[in-house]
Image: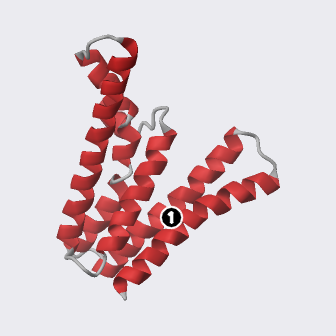
Amino acid sequence: MKFFLFLFDRGENLAGGIYGTILVTSIVAASDTSLTIWRSLSIVTVTIGVFWLAHVYAGLLAWSIESDEPISYRQVRQFAFREWPLLQAVVVPALALVAGGIGLIEYRTAYAIAIGYGAASLIWWGLLYARNEHLGRRATLVVVLVNALFGLGIVVLKWFVGH
């Protein structure tokens, strides 16, 4: 049970979750129709894994240089957990692609779910931010619209790639 809770613990790095969401959704949108669903899934998971490792590695190196301390196993664990939300962003889109790959849903529906989840998540992140900052209605609307524009940009990307 503890491991299951760990999988869904966002930690404190909301930026990693937002960045991961944009990255995963963009990759899924760009790979729709041009690749098989399994190829799309492998590209998405490998890419997000590489980006996660790169964030952990860069954070560790920067920390070591700034603190003038050697990297320890404790720091590796700390930075890996800090960047965990970036990796978490792939879970729901990957599940949608797997469902499409094994025939539980149509492959187009799988891509639509993965992309729609990403766009909806971006709007959710905007609402979370606005709530956390105690923004008024107008400022909340601006933040949500900016996040929604990222989602719309990804949908436009998908349209261009698909045509």
Tell me which residue sits at (63%, 60%) in the image: 146
Horizontal side of 49 relative to 158 (left or right) equals left
Q: Residue furthest top?
A: 69
Asked which quadrant contains residue 162, the reply is bottom left
Count of numbered marks = 1
Q: Quadrant of the C terminus?
A: bottom left
Task: Give the residue type at disc 1.
Answer: Ala
Q: Is residue 154 among the parts visible in the rendering?
A: yes
Residue 119, image x and y in percent? 51, 64
Asked which quadrant contains residue 138, the reply is bottom right
Which of 9 and 122 lies nearest the eye of the viewer? 122
Residue 53, image x and y in percent? 26, 39
Which of 163 and 100 lies nearest the eye of the viewer? 163
Horizontal side of 134 relative to 86 (left or right) equals right
Q: Is residue 1 among the parts visible in the rendering?
A: no
Residue 5, image x and y in percent? 37, 35
Q: Quadrant of the N terminus?
A: top left
Vertical relation: 61 (above or below) 97: above
Tell me which residue sits at (74%, 53%) in the image: 140
Vertical relation: 97 (above or below) 88: below
Give the crowd class for mark 1: few <14, some 14-19, many >=20 residues within 10 Å: many
Which of 160 and 44 lies nearest the eye of the viewer? 160
Residue 125, image x and y in percent? 57, 50
Q: Secondary structure at mark 1?
A: helix
Disc 1 designates what residue? 119
